Image (spheres, rainbow, N blue to C red):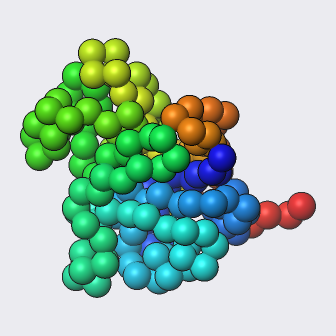
Amino acid sequence: MKKIGIISDTHGYLDDRIIHYLKDLDEIWHAGDWGGIEVSDKLATIAELRGVYGNIDGREIRLTYPKTLRFNCEGVNVLMTHIGGYPGKYAPDIRDEIKSNPPNLFICGHSHIVKVMRDQKLGLLHINPGAAGRSGFHKVRTLVLMDIEGSQMKNLRVVELGLRGEEGFITE
């Protein structure tokens, strides 16, 4: 079994709350708009890190991470990109790949809106973890945690990290 954290749209911001929820995981998956290599460097010290670049990311992130990433975790085929849309409204850049070779799990970011939904037609689970950073129009910062055991995705939960503008310190 692997414990997974899915995060996106950090826009250069990591705080104690984000670290608190990601610190005991096996893998962290970042769906783009890192905002700087410092975010990648810090997350890589916590757990195995996979990711894609987003539309705001500069040269260093784009040289480090691909636009689209397909991989297997346990028995789950995962496809991740930053601008991906959602079931019924996939983005043009990824639509053909999703339809011709559907993954079990499709992850994207970009919208800053947390969304977890099934695509019944293609038989996949779609996850957008929302935005963990402070930049953007979202009101609450979020990330997604889940476990993968064999081909089963389970214990999926959305974590609210606090309001967009507040500092995220853990006081436990």
Quadrant in which the C terminus appears? bottom right
Q: Quadrant of residue 165?
A: bottom right
**Which residue is at a point 86% across and 64% down the rendered structure image?**
171
Location of residue 51 in the rendering, given as x and y in whole percent from the top left corner: 38, 63
Work out whether 118 lies above or below 5. above
- For the question of whether residue 82 can be seen, the reply is no
The reply, left or right, for residue 69 in relation to residue 7 is left
The reply, left or right, for residue 37 in relation to residue 63 is right
Location of residue 158 in the rendering, given as x and y in whole percent from the top left corner: 60, 39
Location of residue 162 in the rendering, given as x and y in whole percent from the top left corner: 65, 51
The reply, left or right, for residue 121 in relation to residue 100 is right
**Which residue is at a point 63% across and 73% down the rendered structure image?**
46
Q: Give the camera-side residue of 172 and 134.
A: 172
* Numbered-mark total: 0
Q: Quadrant of residue 12?
A: bottom left
For this orientation, the residue located farthest to the top is 120
**Which residue is at a point 40% across and 22% down the rendered structure image?**
118
Work out whether 147 lies above or below 25. above
Location of residue 79 in the rendering, given as x and y in whole percent from the top left corner: 32, 46
- For the question of whether residue 34 can be seen, the reply is yes
**Which residue is at a point 38% across and 34% down the rendered structure image?**
104
Q: Give the camera-side residue of 131 and 52.
A: 52
For this orientation, the residue located farthest to the right is 172
